[in-house]
Image (cartoon, rainbow, N blue to C red):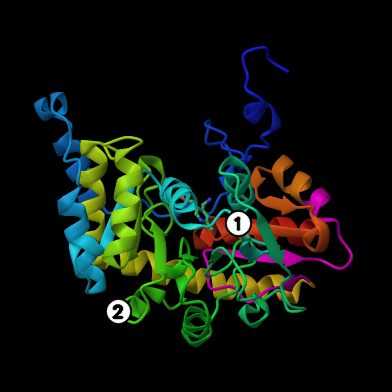
Amino acid sequence: MSRFWSAKVHDLTPYVPGEQPQDQVYIKLNTNESPYGPSPKAISAMQAACDDRLRLYPDPQGLALKESIARLYGLSSDQVFVGNGSDEVLAFSFQGFFKQDKPLLFPDISYSFYPVYCELYDIEARTLPLDSEFAIDLDQYPQENGGIIFPNPNAPTGRALSLDAIAALLERNRDSVVVVDEAYIDFGGDSAASLIPRFDNLLVIQTLSKSRALAGIRVGFALGNRELIEGLERIKNSFNSYPLDRPALAGATAAIEDREHFESSCRKVIATREWCSTALSQMGFEVIPSKANFVFASHPRHSAAELYQQLKEGGILVRYFNKARINNHLRITIGTDSEMQQLITRLEALL
Ligand code: PMP
């Protein structure tokens, strides 16, 4: 207990991010980064932005980036919000849209930042169990709620929901904001962005950290109707009028514009995920069908905690989960074909 901390800080249970060793000695399959670099055009744009203009503040609106994203989704720039990683965009949504007198609904197995933001912003949380196949069952979500949030595909399971199920939820909950966290949508899911014209209660949040391989510059964005986007702008301006720096704005815009690099990286990750899921199943793992850039797997005869440790000792970093129903699961980020081949070879030796 610090004599300088407020009671609030004392009571917080902060989010613990995955291990980020900075020495590059591991095959790093633990925090769902891309194994392929960002678009070379994004790197050039960031380098070009590092000149004398760094003495000037960046565009507080980030308009060029918003316009690129809007074009990608057939929206207008005032239906786009940009922020410092999707974690920040999520935090603003928690501050702005979820009612304090009714519970926010989210899956019991889901992104572990949600309960942290609930605690930080005094929002009551109500979690709903995944079904027996580890899928989110939106039909169970009661209409009495102060908002709804879920990742699609879900993390850490990788399972995706259909747009029909999401549209039906939006229809039943017209007075609640429904946030769809699409951090992993580009690896085979269907984005709910196409539902924005039909539902003014929908906010879609995405990131450039995964499919565009830019976790190092922290850029995320939200898509939604103008009223929701204006709400986010108000919160942002009350917190920091310049969330994105000049190099990040330039790099993110170039990355969104380079669709070829983006599509080819996503295609490679998906192809690797498919053969890797089959190889893991053949080794006796139960693998949840994934639409993300990771797979979630458990072995009936082996402890995930031990496998994690043994893989780590052999230079391969994955993540294991030890909570309730997912206590014996490994979450393995999809790397390059060669990295995944090394993982499979190592697992064959361990099992
Ligand atoms: N949502 C989900 C479901 C995630 O797994 C992550 C990555 N940890 C994020 C959001 C945040 O991504 P970022 O802040 O890098 O945009």
- Image quadrant in which the N terminus is located: top right
| Residue 307 x, y percent position in the rendering | 79, 52
Q: Position of residue 183 (x, y in %)?
A: 46, 60
**Mark 2 Cβ inside 8 Å of ligand 1:** no
Q: Residues within 10 Å of mark 1 (few under 14, many from 20)?
A: few
Asked whether residue 38 appears in the rendered view, the answer is no
Q: Is residue 293 positioned above or below 120 on the image?
A: below
Which residue is label 2 attached to?
A: 197
N-terminal of the pair, mark 2 or mark 1, is: 1
Q: Which residues are magenta?
A: 285-307
- Residue found at x 41% / y 70%: 202
Q: Does the segment drawn in magenta span residue 294?
A: yes
User: Disc 1 marks which residue?
Assistant: 101
- Identify the secondary structure beneath mark 1: loop
Q: Amino acid at mark 1?
A: Asp
In the rendered image, residue 234 lying in the magenta stretch gets the answer no
